[in-house]
Image (cartoon, rainbow, N blue to C red):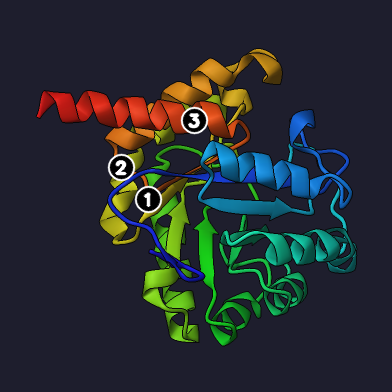
């Protein structure tokens, strides 16, 4: 997969979460324009391969903010990051207006938690800027019964929309949407069978970092997050989107070392 000038393949890479919101569920990820450079520097030094900027919380029960508010939150931080670091930057948004502003300002990728379905102009906007895109599964109502058909069908339709709009197939990554429109049992089923999504034909991104499917409080969920990252390595997932960069980079390296020793 290509993001910006970087090619990612044959490994599991870390995408670092940098939230520019006052209400994201994990307080340690919340940053402002004043401290974002320090946070990015720390993430890059710890081994992050991509930075993911979020200007809209998508925690359960979140209150949506407008595209204009998103843009006001990420514009300066994005400008600072691109001026000081040579690292691909993804912006987390489902508004094409926000996506356009981000891409004009130098963002390399759009991470859309509605998989190009919330805004009919999103796929076209990504294509016009030759950007990369993460297409995540989501639904307006919780899934029931078999989860695999609706997830796979949604992702296939969104990929078709992206390709028909002109998005480069080498700039697409898919996310099964752990924690979105699924109950705890469904999230665990998705996680445990995540490699099934590879048959769609695109690389995968996994986002489980400190999420509620692991139970308990967010501050106690790092061990389970790291185990899901090790699982991602075994399942051939290309990216894990995480809060704790150093710990996840270490877990990935250890898992590859363990696999290579077996060969």
Q: Is residue 192 above or below residue 62?
A: above
Determine the residue positioned at 47% across, 71% down.
Answer: 5
Residue where numbered disc 3 is placed: 248
User: Is residue 57 in view from this perspective?
Assistant: no
Q: Nearer the viewer, residue 178 or 16?
A: 16
Do the numbered discs 1 and 2 sit on residues whose CB atoms are within 8 Å?
no
Which of label 1 and label 2 is nearer to you?
A: 2
| Position of the C terminus by quadrant | top left
Q: Is residue 190 above or below residue 67?
A: above
Q: Using residue 7 as the reference point, say whether residue 58 is left or right of it.
A: right
User: Is residue 137 in view from this perspective?
Assistant: yes
Mark 3 and mark 1 lie on one chain; the one further toward the N terminus is: 1
Residue 195, numbered circle: 2
- Dot 3: within a 10 Å radius of its alpha carbon, few (fewer than 14), some, or many (20 or more) residues? many
- Dot 2: within a 10 Å radius of its alpha carbon, few (fewer than 14), some, or many (20 or more) residues? some
Alpha-carbon distance for marks 3 and 1? Answer: 30 Å
Residue where numbered disc 1 is placed: 149
Alpha-carbon distance for marks 1 and 2? Answer: 14 Å
Q: Is residue 52 above or below residue 67?
A: above
Which of label 2 and label 3 is nearer to you?
A: 3
């Amino acid at each position: 997969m290509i993001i910006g000038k970087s090619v990612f393949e044959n490994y599991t890479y870390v995408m670092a979460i940098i939230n520019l919101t006052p209400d994201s569920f994990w307080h340690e990820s919340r940053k402002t324009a004043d401290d974002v450079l320090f946070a990015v520097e720390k993430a890059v030094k710890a081994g992050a391969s991509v930075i993911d900027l979020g200007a809209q919380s998508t925690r359960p029960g979140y209150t949506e903010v407008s595209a204009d508010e998103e843009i006001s939150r990420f514009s300066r931080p994005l400008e600072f990051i691109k001026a000081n670091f040579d690292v691909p930057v993804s912006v987390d948004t489902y508004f094409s207006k926000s996506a356009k502003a981000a891409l004009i300002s130098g963002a390399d990728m759009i991470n859309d938690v509605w998989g190009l379905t919330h805004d009919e102009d999103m796929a076209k906007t990504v294509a016009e800027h030759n950007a990369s895109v993460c297409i995540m599964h989501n639904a307006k109502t919780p899934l029931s019964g078999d989860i695999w058909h609706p997830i796979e069908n949604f992702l296939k339709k969104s990929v078709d929309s992206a390709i028909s709009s002109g998005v480069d197939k080498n700039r697409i990554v898919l996310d099964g949407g752990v924690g979105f429109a699924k109950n705890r049992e469904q999230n665990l089923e998705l996680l445990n069978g995540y490699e099934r999504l590879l048959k769609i034909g695109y690389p995968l991104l996994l986002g489980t970092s400190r999420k509620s499917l692991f139970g308990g409080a967010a501050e106690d969920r790092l061990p389970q997050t790291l185990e899901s990252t090790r699982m991602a390595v075994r399942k051939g997932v290309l990216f894990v989107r995480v809060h704790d960069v150093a710990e996840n980079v270490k877990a990935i390296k250890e898992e590859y070392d363990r696999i290579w020793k077996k060969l």
